[in-house]
Image (cartoon, rainbow, N blue to C red):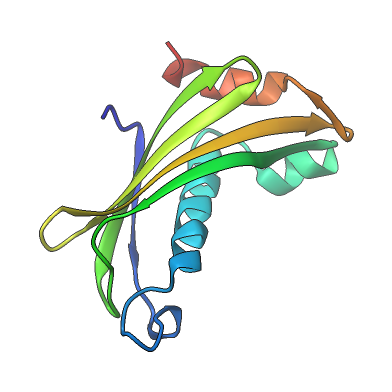
């Protein structure tokens, strides 16, 4: 995979379930946080775009849980990006930092609502242009 962005995070104890592994819903938080950090890296502010009436929303997700993360595990969240029609497709993988073991894989499809209507965002297109071939 041709990753274009990565960040490191650590599992916090309250994110784990009674089995001692990260609760499945928290993986979605990790991937969303990564996308928001990527936006900032591209010079975009999720909240400022919202104030302009531009909202990127998740339309579809495909998730694969591979190896569980546990309390205090450090992990690396990586993403790549493509665009199909009006959909931005984020391919996101989480790797345990200690051994680079793939723990979680997601394909996240986002669309933009411009003042509540489905459409293209020139702001997102311009910011993502260097990564879309």
Q: How many numbered discs?
A: 0
Task: Say if 113 sits above or below 127 in the image.
Answer: below
Identify the residue at the far bottom of this view. 18
Name the residue at 88% across, 35% down: 116
Task: Say if 86 sits above or below 23 in the image.
Answer: above
101 relative position to 109: left or right: left
Which residue is more in the foreground, 53 or 68?
A: 68
Whole-percent x, y for residue 28 in the image: 50, 57
Task: Say if 73 sits above or below 38 in the image.
Answer: below
20 relative position to 44: left or right: left
75 relative position to 117: left or right: left
Name the residue at 67% across, 31% down: 111
Name the residue at 27% across, 67% down: 68
Name the residue at 59% across, 39% down: 60
Q: Tell me the quarter of the image containing the N terminus.
A: top left
Task: Say if 14 sits above or below 91 in the image.
Answer: below
Whole-percent x, y for residue 71 in the image: 30, 80
Q: Quadrant of residue 103?
A: bottom left
133 relative position to 117: left or right: left
Q: Tell me the quarter of the image containing the C terminus.
A: top left
Whole-percent x, y for residue 117 in the image: 86, 29
Whole-percent x, y for residue 80 in the image: 38, 32
Identify the residue at the far left of this view. 99
């Amino acid at each position: 995979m041709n990753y274009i962005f990565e960040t490191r995070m650590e599992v916090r104890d309250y994110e784990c379930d009674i089995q001692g592994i990260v609760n499945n819903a928290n993986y979605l938080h990790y991937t969303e946080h990564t996308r928001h950090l990527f936006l900032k890296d591209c010079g975009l502010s999720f909240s400022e775009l919202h104030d302009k009436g531009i909202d990127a929303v998740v339309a579809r997700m495909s998730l694969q849980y591979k190896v569980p993360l546990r309390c205090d595990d450090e992990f690396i969240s990586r993403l790549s990006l493509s665009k199909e029609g009006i959909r931005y497709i984020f391919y996101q993988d989480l790797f345990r930092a200690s051994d680079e073991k793939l723990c979680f894989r997601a394909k996240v499809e986002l669309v933009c609502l411009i003042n509540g209507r489905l459409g293209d965002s020139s702001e997102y297109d311009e910011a993502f242009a260097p990564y879309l071939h």
